[in-house]
Image (spheres, helix red, strand yellow):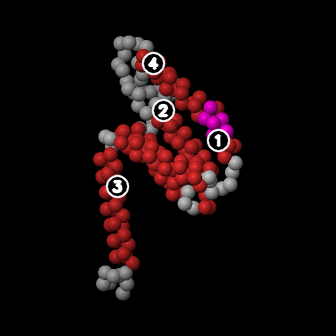
Amino acid sequence: MEGVGGDGPSTAAAALNQRRHDVSKLFQHYLDKSTPHSLHRWIGSFILVCVYALRVYYIQGFYIVTYGLGIYILNLLIGFLSPLVDPEAEPSDGPMLPTKGSDEFKPFIRRLPEFKFWYAITKAFCVAFVMTFFSMFDVPVFWPILLCYWLCRLCEKDLPQAVPEAIDFLRRTEG
């Protein structure tokens, strides 16, 4: 009869699942402890960015990985700079931005909170760093073309979407 005796693949799978659960809890514990220390988190991420940049510079490759990373970070930045609810696009019965000095002040609530923004950027740089160890991701491209395309995308699509929303919010809260 299978499964009798406690030996076999089911015991190994249960032990592996328990170990994975323990590591996940430990990781979450350290993430929770790092939440109030935003300056230290960003310094650590900056060091990771520098290590990644140095690796790409010295290898002279993986430009397509870096380009994809740049597009991803740009999308994260737009989410970070955008409000959770656009009052002009979605009129609601909930809290609105003040229009007069006597109105109650409603703080700017981001679509992507700072901690999630930091975590996503750090995770993205870790994944990109690991990708630089595998030659299958080193697609030969002429990097200036990717840089020009990324800058054009930034200036034509992404910034015009995010900056006016932030400026409009600042105008409403000051006046």
Mark earlier in primary sequence (4, 1)? 1
Q: What residue does disc 2 label? A: 81
Q: What residue does disc 3 label? A: 27
Q: What residue does disc 1 label? A: 147
Disc 4 element: helix
- Where is residue 123 drawn, in percent x and y? 46, 50
Mark earlier in primary sequence (3, 2)? 3
Q: Amino acid at mark 2?
A: Leu
Residues at badges 4 and 1 in contact (C-beta under 8 Å)?
Answer: no
Comparing marks 2 and 4, which lies closer to the viewer?
A: 2
- Residue 160 falls left or right of residue 77: right
- Where is residue 20 drawn, in percent x and y? 36, 64
Q: Badge 4 local density, few (<14 within 10 Å), some, or many (20+)?
A: some
Q: Amino acid at mark 1?
A: Leu
Q: What residue does disc 4 label? A: 172
- Identify the residue at horizontal 41%, vertical 13% (top origin): 100
Comparing marks 3 and 4, which lies closer to the viewer?
A: 3
Mark earlier in primary sequence (3, 4)? 3
Distance Cα–Cα, label 3 vs label 4: 41 Å
State whether residue 116 appears in this view.
no
Comparing marks 4 and 1, which lies closer to the viewer?
A: 1
